[in-house]
Amino acid sequence: MIKLPCSSYGPMQMEVQKELLLEMYRRMLRIREFELGAMDLFKRGQVKGAVHPYIGQEASGVGVCMALRRDDLIAGTHRSHGHTLAKGADTKKMMAEILGKETGYCKGRGGSMHIAAFETGSLGALAVVGSGIPLAVGAALAFKMRGEDKVCVPFTGEGGSNTGNWHECMNMASVWNLPVIFVLENNQYAVSTKVDTVIKVKDLSLRAQGYGIPGVRVDGFDVLTVYEAATKAVARARRGEGPTLLVTESYRFEGHYAGEPEVYRTRAEVEEHRKLDPIPRFHKYLIDNAKASLDEVKAIDTEVKQEIADAIEFAKASPPPDPATAKDYIYA
Amino acid sequence: MSLGDDGEMTSKEKDATSLGSTRPVMSPDLIVQVPQGIPAKEMSYQEAIREALREEMLRDERVFLMGEDIAKHGGAFGVTRTLFDQFGPERVRNTPISENTIVGAGTGAALAGMRPVMEIMFVDFSGLAMDQICTQAAKLRFMTGGQCKVPWVLRMPQGGGAGKSTAAQHSQSLEVWFAHIPGLKVVLPSTPYDAKGLLKAAIRDDSPTIFLEHKFLYSFRGLVPDQEYVLPLGKCDVKRQGKDVTVVTSGAMVWHAMVAANILAPKGISVEVVDVRTISPLDEETIGASARKTGRVVLVAEACRSYGATGEWGMVVVEQAFDYLKAPIMRVTGRFSPIPFADSLEKGVWPETDDVVRAIQRTMA
């Protein structure tokens, strides 16, 4: 059993099984390798549309989703490969979807920006910033009306917290005491727009005060800190005590989309933040503090790399949707 | 704004509301939908909607209502009044003034297995919720490859009435906004019988359905069968059989068409009235068949003309009945203008019975 470090959430210390820690590592690495694979395919022209990489933010999605049960729900954004994988989605069906194949989660109808994996509790990626949040509130309302102890997590960026949706939802979920954990991932940029040019408060968790709910701000590069905060917020929601705003502070290592010129920030700034990379940091933690052997961790590295290679091969070999089915699924 | 309790008025005088036309009277006898001998009672359009909600809530515990002031107050027009007392605050749920989140939360609840019926006070306010209606709910099933369905109904009063002075932001007819979006169904009933049967169908349907209620029909009365019935979505209803001219119309305009048909019958003009009671998906077959039968077509819509429903219906006629046409297709529509407040300006903004009569006569000339 491992003692977690204190987080900015409070003085509580949690005990986490080593197996769970290794699974966190596996999921973070799976996201990283998936995104690198997707970006590579995009640069080769094999992935159409757009890819919005989650690289640098893996600890946030994984820390939150590892605190959830499979039957809890998440709702995502245009940048949600990471959330969906963190919730347990299958890499083959994910990769097939972004290549527009019939074997993808959405049978090639959605693509990178709209991957939904209902089988693992992902309501989907809604690619209009802020628009997925009301869905999470409504699902949470359904849980509450039926007396179920499930919770719902809408992910959004700091940019999304400026939408009317976000504020309407914070208000509605708090006044109805719904089991929602609003995860606000501050990756510092909305496309090219730096957070401090569009939001007055420095500590975004202060926004919770306006809605009478707890606001928590944690290091989004530290998966254990995120996990601990999410676990407390989830427990609170399951007890029927209502929503929490959880702000995870991190940084988007890549451009807004794969191949973006990034004229709005310096290379030096990006390199400075890459030193905070959550994956090597957690790797070191596993060896130094969790009694994991180098071989154990290396085995995960190898397995994940193979898994992504297999997913790419599966996706490439899969058939595209049949044009004769173009009008399927418009109506139920 | 609130228009008070139009639907509560039951006097014969109110039943015969003429939508501003001084003649003739719009009597419930104009549209008979329940055969003699079938047990039925007379109720208003508003009561019929309320009974549909009540029956479906009793039938299926997943059905619940959500909207602004719908609980004790009963909504802007009193449609949900008494349902709060029967079903309580969980299932007749007052919301904050947050149209986009009302609809979005309805979508989320639907994804999680409920069957919400949301109310937005006036269709004019739907602009606040268009992202959730058109960009989220309408597309979710499609873009997730059929992983989910969104079985909700969004009820919105719409339309205007001469002399009501509800002005530019509470009077519009916006059915085509929604009809342009694949994935949505759009329903616009013209009678109490249709309102009840179509709303029950919409609640049971697994696609998101926009249910538009003409606010000046709320007090219109008609017979509704005692026994349960459900009407099909996606079908036109021939409200009156005729052989000389087809009038294709919907909503409150159906009543103008029926009165016009009555005026012209003694003059030897036999008018068929096709009620497009589901705007989308459009039942092209019924429109085409009627146009081929009569060879003359008048299209009547309350909404303003440009890019409106009459353009769509007219093209269906062209595609399906061009060789049968004996006269140019005529259109009677609302003026292409925001709805004015002053009586002197409001007059003429919407079609009246006389306009429909004249258009029919021109196709016969």
Image (tube, rainbow, N blue to C red):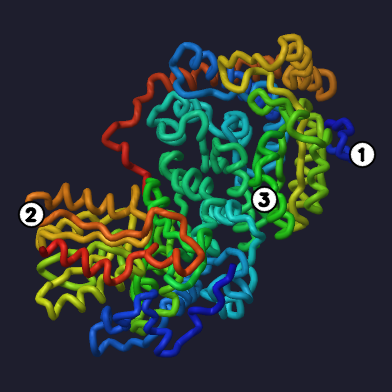
Labels 2, 1: front one: 2
Viewer-closest of A129 and A249: A129
Amino acid bearing label 2: Tyr
What subunit carries mark 3?
Answer: A
| Mark 1 secondary-structure assignment | loop
Which residue is painted at 30% across and 73% down in the image?
Answer: B255
| Mark 2 secondary-structure assignment | helix
What subunit carries mark 1?
Answer: A
Residue B107: x and y in percent read 53, 52
Residue position for label 3:
A169
Q: Is residue A270 visible?
A: yes
Viewer-closest of B54 and B29: B29
Q: CA distance from mark 2 to mark 1?
A: 83 Å
User: Do the residues at pointers 3 and 2 share their chain?
Assistant: no
Amino acid bearing label 1: Pro
Q: Is residue A155 above or below residue A288?
A: below
What subunit carries mark 2?
Answer: B
Within 10 Å of the Cα at label 1, are there few (<14), some (14-19), or many (20+) other Cα atoms? Answer: few
Residue A115: x and y in percent read 51, 34
| Mark 3 secondary-structure assignment | helix
User: Do the residues at pointers 3 and 1 share their chain?
Assistant: yes
Left-right relation of B136 to A204: left
Viewer-closest of B105 and A227: B105
Within 10 Å of the Cα at label 2, are there few (<14), some (14-19), or many (20+) other Cα atoms? Answer: some
Residue position for label 1:
A11
Q: Is residue A22 visible?
A: no
Residue position for label 2:
B324
Amino acid bearing label 3: Cys
Left-right relation of A96 to A244: left
Q: CA distance from mark 3 to mark 1?
A: 30 Å
Q: Residue A14 falls in which quadrant of the image?
A: top right
Which residue is painted at 44% across and 79% down in the image?
Answer: B219
